[in-house]
Amino acid sequence: MTILKGAVIGYPVQKSKSPLIYRHWLKAYGIPGNYEAIEIQADELSHRLSQLIDQGYNGLSVTLPHKQTIMSLCDEIDDTARAIGAVNSIQIKDGKLYATNTDAFGFIQNIKIAVPDFIFKNRRACVLGAGGAARAIIQGLVEQGMTDIIVTNRTRTRAEDMVTTFPSLRVVDWADKDQALSGIDLLVNTTSLGMEGQDRLDISLDHLPPSAVVNDIVYYPLMTDLLKNAESRGNKPITGIGMLIHQACRSFHNWCGVDPVVTDDLIQAVL
């Protein structure tokens, strides 16, 4: 049986929910091992990574600020992570790092479970933000057959950089994001705006169709102002906690060979 010695690495990571999630599954499936949070600053990543390998770690979750910089230190990177341009999960075998990105899977699974009848193919989406999470989400949408995706970011050049990877993207100025919601089927916030301790997300939903689904990947607070506003006008809100848990499912499968079930008690524990 696999013995998991895992950790989430990043800076900061002390508020990460990952240890709670993975420890829950280790206990639920009787798998020996442990999973912890390890803070690693950007300038010590290479050195600390070598230490973790020497210490026998075999499963790593990767969060900010390392999702892109760690790619140069990995031995193998799968097609999904390369397309996204970021890594969030690593399996260590025989001292080698095998990297992937499970965020696209987690995002799509969360929507499919929250809105089972949602159709992706040939629909329209607007994605707020142009960081690693946005890239993963756009990759997931493209894989599901979504043909019209708008991206808008406070720094327009970052959004334009994504067109190289996703040629079908349409870039809209941040100042024009309200009008860009006209005819949209799915609105996704991937920025930190609206998160506890961050600036509020200043956006009007007046142009958003009532049938549109609104997903905020922020989960501190769980119901952001964006989701509250969406719900008040009849749009279906989807919280970010599901993406967090479902992306972890794929990592747990890779590390332990088990497909964990997302139960209500786990969701409540995370919340």
Image (tube, grey):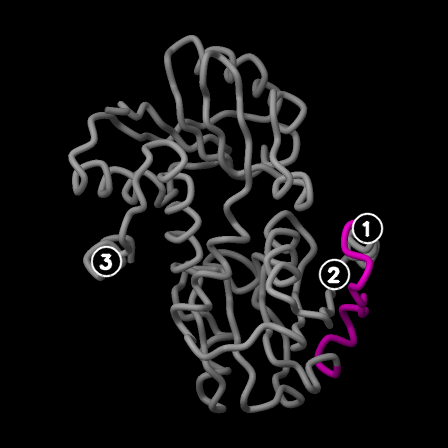
* Element class at badge 3: loop
Helix, strand or loop status at disc 2: loop
**Residue at left offset 46%, top offset 30%:** 9
Q: Return the residue at label 2.
A: 154
Question: Mark 1 — residue?
Answer: 161
Figure check: 16 above or below 158: above
Say which residue appears at 59% left-offset and 57% top-offset. 140
Mark 2 is surrounded, within 10 Å at the Cα level, by few (under 14), some (14 to 19) or many (20 or more) other residues, namely some
Foreground of the two, 242 or 202: 242
Q: Is residue 114 left or right of residue 120?
A: left
Q: How many marks?
A: 3
Under mark 3, the amino acid is Thr
Q: Amino acid at mark 2?
A: Arg
Location of the N terminus (image quadrant): top left
Say if the magenta span includes residue 169: yes
Work out whether 252 lies above or below 43.
below
Residue 57 position, x and y percent, is 38, 19
Q: In the figure, 92 relative to 218: above or below?
A: above
Q: Earlier in the sequence, mark 1 or mark 3?
A: 1
Which mark, by number, is residue 263?
Answer: 3
Q: Residue at x 63, y 90 (%)?
A: 206
Cα gap from disc 2 to disc 3, whole angstroms: 37 Å
Residue extending furthest toward the top: 54
Nearer mark to the viewer, of 2 and 3:
3
Residue 182 picture location, percent across and down: 70, 86
Magenta residues span 165-179
